[in-house]
Amino acid sequence: MKLEFKQNFRIPHSAPLETAQAYLRDPLASLKEVSFMRDLRLEASKPGGDKLEAPTVTAELLVSVPLLGDLPIPFKSTLEPTSEGANLHPLELTGKTWAKVSGVGRALETELLYDLHVEVFVELPGGEKWGGFAFSKMVDATSKKALERVLKEFPRGVSSGLIQYIP
């Protein structure tokens, strides 16, 4: 099963522009108050052939899904600093449940602009029989609603982290 979500939002701020841009480039600061993320880590850049490999952000999205319980959904993305903030580029993982998380964060004089894209991949038991098919449909419907609820909390977490980040 694949679930896909896109969310665009704006967060007003009063920080100096350089501080807001630095905040977007620091996922350990900008994502630490997002309540549905756990085990957030940033792996530093490493040499990769002729150039430096981009740093990677890893974490788990924790989503409570009816019929399945608390579902930890790991993701890994590369972090690309930009002149206005940062971009996340998704990396593919293996396993029964995982996510691709990508996005663009831009700092303007008075607001942060975010474009977030999340694709979740969940392997469900086979649905060859009517019961399995019905179960898959129920999980699909409840998972979409649970993930939508969780992702709507994302701007609040980012905003809360920014308040703590400003000196």
Image: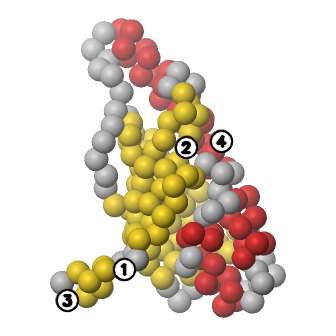
Of marks 2 and 3, which one's residue comes earlier in the chain? 3
Rounded to the nearest whole Å, what is the CA distance between mark 3 and mark 4? 43 Å
Residue 62: mark in rendering: 2
**Residue at numbered disc 3:** 50
Residue 102 is left or right of residue 111, and the answer is left
Within-10-Å neighbours for mark 2: few <14, some 14–19, many 20+:
some
Rounded to the nearest whole Å, what is the CA distance between mark 2 and mark 3? 37 Å
Quadrant occupied by the C terminus: bottom right
Of marks 1 and 3, which one's residue comes earlier in the chain? 1
Nearest the viewer among 92 and 59 is 59
Label 4 vs label 2, nearer the camera: 2
- Going by the numbered disc 2, the residue's amino acid type is Leu
- Going by the numbered disc 4, the residue's amino acid type is Arg
Of marks 4 and 2, which one's residue comes earlier in the chain? 2
**Residue at numbered disc 4:** 149
**Residue at the spot 25% in from the left edge and 88% down from the top edge:** 51
**Residue at the spot 62% in from the left edge and 71% down from the top edge:** 29
Of marks 3 and 4, which one's residue comes earlier in the chain? 3
Residue 57: mark in rendering: none
- Going by the numbered disc 1, the residue's amino acid type is Ser
Q: Give the percent coordinates (x, y) of residue 161.
A: 71, 67
**Residue at numbered disc 1:** 45
